[in-house]
Image (cartoon, grey):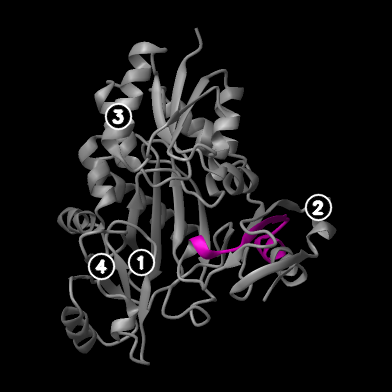
């Protein structure tokens, strides 16, 4: 009998990973609360269960494991649900990270405190639970400062010199130094004078597979919200700096108890060297793990993560980059309004350096004001001999494609 892999979440970004798992000869089960989840069509079996509801998913997986066929591994792809995954693994005695590590990864304030206790370099931060506390922090530290909910990366805000600490910033959802989507009103704040994050994805003990640079040239456009407008690889930092960043990212993973598993680090390079913004106990989304890293480095990151989820050993050689090709992703941000037409995309359908292009809207849909990454209207991933060439190509597509709104 084929071994069975349970994948929590069946969004569009998970489809390449689901396909890869089946190519590896696995029986793939996908769980998602959306009956029309794209991943269901790519899987062998599908189960309706809320990916963020730990108890519901654990119960569904246990029932499938007992009544249908035994599950050999569990993981997520392009979904921030490490606690759900770890809980399923613990309930069914499957390989996985400790549940407590997943809890720390989900509570960014507790994570920061664990980093501080372990001596991991982190920026100054402060928990914020009210407008008065935010005003006090701005008065003490000055601006810019970054304000972010504790349990998710959406709705990050920047307090700037124009009085960005006004009530309209939405201070109610915050509590830590690096991220979250918390429902209890907690959030956090930390200095905004930092370079763009350097992402580091890894799937085996202490071997990072790739590093990329996020672009935040839209900071003023969408102020006070912080929304990345793309990313590129290889990193523009010198090799020595990248090595230091990778080492600190892996140390941060170990500081929250992850010895073997998938880790995604959001890092910044400062005059003191690397600092950790946060660590996610999962693979990167945004087509990073499924497309961008394999394109740029030749590393089959998804296959490595699948093998770890099944309890297999992944040799360091399998995570060592085989090339350093330029890869870039850029997003489409049309004006808010109802979409009337999307033009110019057909010209790039068969262009060899356009790896993937997709839209999250179609004529008739309404484009909302950009307050977080879910409001982006589409994306394009391009390749090139160098990072600069890939970036230039991606930006040329963004300039040529027009999403018209009224």
Work out whether residue 265 or residue 164 is closer to the camera in this orientation and state it. Answer: 164
Give the CA distance from mark 3 to mark 1. Answer: 41 Å
Comes first in the chain, label 1 or label 2: 1
x, y percentage for residue 49? 39, 34
Residue that protrudes farthest toward the front in the picture: 364
Left or right of residue 396: residue 61: left
Sooner in the amino-acid sequence: mark 1 or mark 4: 4
The residue tagged 4 is 174
Residue hosting label 2: 349
Labels 1, 4: front one:
4
Which callout, 4 or 3, points at the residue further toward the start of the chain?
3
Magenta range is 374-391
**Residue 405 appears left or right of 192:** right
**Which element carries disc 1, helix, strand or loop?**
strand
Kindly check if marks 4 and 3 are in contact, taking CB atoms under 8 A apart as contact. Answer: no
Q: Quadrant of residue 121?
A: bottom left
Neighbor class of circle 1 (other Cα within 10 Å; few <14, some 14-19, many 20+) is few
Residue at 61% across, 45% down: 291
Q: Is residue 347 above or below residue 88?
A: below
SS at circle 2: loop
Q: Is residue 315 visible?
A: no
Measure how far apart labels 1 and 2 are at the Cα level. 42 Å
- The circle on residue 273 is 1
Given residues 201 and 7, the one toward you in this image is 7
Q: Are marks 2 and 3 in contact (CB under 8 Å)?
A: no
* Residue 277 lies in the magenta stretch: no
Q: CA distance from mark 4 to mark 3?
A: 29 Å
Instruction: Tell me: residue 58, above or below residue 336.
Output: above
Q: Residue at x 27, y 21 (%)?
A: 93
Label 1 to label 4: alpha-carbon separation: 27 Å
Distance (Cα) linking label 4 and label 2 = 42 Å
């Amino acid at each position: 009998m084929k071994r069975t892999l349970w994948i929590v979440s069946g969004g569009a970004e998970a489809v390449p990973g689901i396909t890869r798992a089946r190519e590896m000869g696995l029986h793939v089960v996908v769980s998602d609360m959306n009956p029309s989840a794209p991943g269901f069509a790519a899987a062998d079996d599908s189960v309706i269960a809320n990916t963020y509801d730990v108890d519901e998913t654990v119960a569904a997986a246990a029932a499938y494991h007992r009544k249908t066929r035994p599950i050999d591994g569990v993981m997520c792809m392009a979904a921030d649900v490490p606690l759900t995954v770890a809980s399923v693994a613990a309930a069914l005695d499957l390989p996985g990270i400790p549940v407590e590590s997943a809890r720390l990864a989900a509570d960014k304030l507790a994570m920061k405190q664990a980093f501080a206790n372990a001596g991991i370099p982190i920026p100054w931060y402060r928990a914020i639970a009210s407008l008065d506390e935010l005003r006090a922090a701005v008065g003490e530290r000055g601006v810019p400062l970054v304000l972010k909910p504790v349990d998710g990366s959406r709705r990050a805000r920047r307090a700037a010199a124009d009085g960005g600490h006004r009530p309209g910033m939405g201070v109610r959802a915050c509590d830590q130094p690096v991220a979250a989507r918390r429902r209890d009103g907690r959030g956090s704040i930390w200095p905004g004078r930092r370079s763009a994050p350097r992402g580091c994805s890894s799937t085996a003990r202490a071997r990072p597979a790739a590093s990329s640079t996020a672009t935040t040239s839209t900071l003023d456009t969408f102020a006070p919200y912080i929304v990345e407008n793309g990313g590129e690889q290889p990193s523009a930092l010198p090799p020595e700096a990248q090595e230091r960043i990778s080492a600190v990212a892996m140390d941060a993973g170990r500081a929250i108890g992850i010895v073997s598993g998938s880790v995604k680090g959001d890092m910044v390079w400062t005059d003191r060297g690397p600092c950790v913004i946060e660590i996610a106990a999962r693979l990167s989304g945004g087509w990073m793990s499924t497309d961008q890293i394999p394109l740029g480095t030749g590393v089959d990151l998804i296959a490595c993560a699948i093998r770890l989820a099944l309890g297999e050993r992944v040799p360091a050689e399998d995570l060592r980059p085989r090339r350093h090709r330029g890869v870039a992703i850029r997003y489409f941000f049309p004006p808010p309004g109802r979409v009337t037409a999307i033009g110019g995309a057909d010209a790039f359908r068969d262009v060899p350096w356009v790896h993937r292009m997709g839209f999250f809207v179609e004529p008739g849909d309404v484009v909302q004001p950009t307050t977080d990454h879910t409001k982006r209207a589409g994306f394009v991933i391009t390749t090139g001999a160098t990072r600069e060439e890939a970036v230039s190509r991606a930006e040329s597509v963004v300039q040529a494609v027009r999403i018209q709104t009224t």
